[in-house]
Image (cartoon, rainbow, N blue to C red):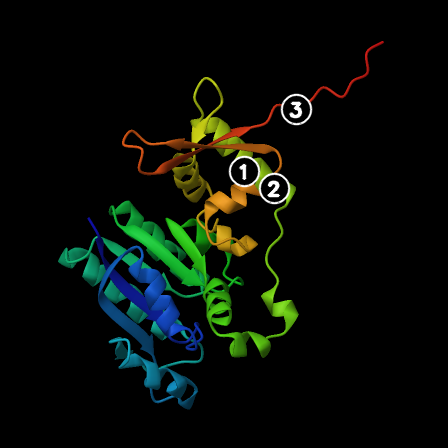
Amino acid sequence: MDLNLAVLIDGDNIPSAYVKEMMQEIAKYGNPTIKRIYGDWTNPRLNKWKTVLLENAITPIQQYGYTQGKNATDSAMIIDAMDILYSGKVTGFCLVSSDSDFTRLATRLREAGMQVFGIGEKKTPNPFIVACDKFIYIEILKRQTEDDNPDAAADTSESKRTFDKITAKELHLIATTINDVADDDGWAFLGDVGNLLQKKQPNFDARNYGYQKLTPLISSISTIEVDRRDDAKGRNKLIYVKMKEKKNTRSRK
């Protein structure tokens, strides 16, 4: 059953260029029944948002900046989130911001049994990331747009299109996760591995490393063995993975 999601966007803190791609990403996780964006719409800096709000049925919420800074916008978004929570109309939230001020909100929503998805830039502080069930970097959506639009990709510098490298830290995370869910023979169902990876590290996403799915990412790691098995009906392939045994490199005396 799809989640009914409340999508709350911090207009002061998120670029407007990839709203369409962002909404398509959100639709993978549930039905966005409430879509609101918060900001001071008298500020000319937010004019770029106005052209995309109607196209994506996002309701702008006016919040005047009473003092210097954006705390008023943050407060309005937090108050609305709690009102929506107690209304019982949704089963999940998508908080779109790169601001750590929403860390406590994400934590509180999860305590209430809500699924919480975060979307923000890579500069997002880690406390907000780990407070969500899943966190998606907006840079992923930019790359998808560039891949679908060669002209856009041609205008993008190579440095902006680089992917994260799979370091020893990621390899250790994947290896321990496989071992956590493996059977007595060391084999683990990849679906279980992916779910546990998400719980351990909410911003873990194969697309960060240049792969569209987890399967090709795992297959690219030489220390992991991959086995494709037929399901009970023989219609689909079930992917199982196992850490390869380390060879004993000691020379015999």
The Cα atoms of the two marked residues, 1 and 3, are separated by 17 Å
- Up/down of 65 relative to 236, above or below: below
Indicate left or right for 149 with 104 as reference.
right
Label 2 sits on a secondary structure element that is helix
Q: What residue is drawn where x is 19% and y is 62%?
A: 83
Q: Among all residues in the image, which is located at the extreme right?
A: 253
Q: Disc 3 residue type?
A: Lys
- Up/down of 243 relative to 149, above or below: above
The Cα atoms of the two marked residues, 2 and 3, are separated by 18 Å
Q: Disc 1 residue type?
A: Leu
Judge by depth and name the residue closer to the eye, 69 or 143. 143
Task: Please tell me whether mark 1 or mark 3 is closer to you in this view.
Answer: 3
The answer to whether any part of residue 145 appears in the image is yes
**Residue 243's quadrant in the figure?**
top right
Q: Disc 2 residue type?
A: Lys
Look at mark 2 in the image and give the residue it sits on. Answer: 169
Label 1 sits on a secondary structure element that is helix
Look at the numbered discs 1 and 2 and tell me whether their residues touch, using CB distance below 8 Å: yes
Look at mark 1 in the image and give the residue it sits on. Answer: 173
Q: Position of residue 23 (x, y in %)?
A: 33, 67
Q: Position of residue 176 (x, y in %)?
A: 53, 31
- Up/down of 253 relative to 137, above or below: above
Indicate left or right for 209 with 195 as reference.
right
Mark 3 surroundings: few (<14), some (14-19) or many (≥20) residues within 10 A: few
- Up/down of 78 relative to 188, above or below: below
Look at mark 3 in the image and give the residue it sits on. Answer: 246
The Cα atoms of the two marked residues, 1 and 2, are separated by 6 Å
